[in-house]
Image (cartoon, grey):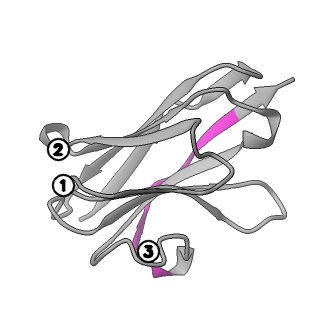
Amino acid sequence: QVQLVESGGGSVQSGGSLRLSCAVSGYTYSSGCITWFRQVPGKMREGVAAAYAGGGSTYYADSVKGRFTISQDNAKNTVYLQMNSLKPEDTAMYYCAARSGTCGNWRVSWTYNYWGQGTQVTVSS
């Protein structure tokens, strides 16, 4: 059974940093696409950053380029999202998701088979 468990969310002031973790189990981690999404109430889920599982190319939404970094520890089957220079508009529930195949069209949420439960990030001004 595939499980994705996020952690690391919290409340920070504008300009602060957080690191989110996504622990993956029951999944063939050496392949596929692992992606961080975020969602605020009333809005569509937004792709934030993606990485090919096991290492390789990474992808970012324009809104977070230069501030967020996706990385992974293959030995721990864990994907991280380092978030720096946080802004109030980064406030959202953050989810990690996984699917087989490449990271083409990585921002299309319905193409992902597996989702975590989410972790809340709140940035105050």
The answer to whether residue 118 is magenta is yes
Disc with the residue nearer the chain's start (2 vs 1): 1
The correct choice, above or below, for 86 with respect to 27 in the image is above
Image quarter hosting the N terminus? bottom left
Which residue is found at the position 46% from the left and 81% from the top?
111
> Which quadrant holds residue 104?
bottom left
Name the residue carrying label 3.
112
Disc with the residue nearer the chain's start (3 vs 1): 1
Name the residue carrying label 1.
54
Which residue is found at the position 47% from the left and 71% from the top?
106
Badge 1 crowding class, 10 Å Cα cut-off, few under 14, some 14 to 19, many 20 or more, is some
Contact check, label 2 and label 1, Cβ < 8 Å: yes
Q: Position of residue 23 (x, y in %)?
A: 31, 43
Q: Position of residue 114 (x, y in %)?
A: 39, 68
Disc with the residue nearer the chain's start (3 vs 2): 2
Please state which of residues 41 and 84 is positioned toward the viewer in this rendering.
84
Which range is magenta? 111-121
Badge 3 crowding class, 10 Å Cα cut-off, few under 14, some 14 to 19, many 20 or more, is some
Q: Secondary structure at mark 1?
A: loop
Q: Secondary structure at mark 2?
A: helix
Please state which of residues 34 and 68 is positioned toward the viewer in this rendering.
68
Please state which of residues 81 and 114 is positioned toward the viewer in this rendering.
81
Can you tell which of label 3 and label 1 is closer to the viewer? Answer: 1
Marks 3 and 2 sit apart, C-alpha to C-alpha, by: 20 Å
Contact check, label 3 and label 1, Cβ < 8 Å: no
Name the residue carrying label 2.
74
Q: Amino acid at mark 1?
A: Gly
Q: Position of residue 33 (x, y in %)?
A: 33, 66
Q: Amino acid at mark 2?
A: Asn
Q: Amino acid at mark 3?
A: Tyr
Q: Secondary structure at mark 3?
A: loop
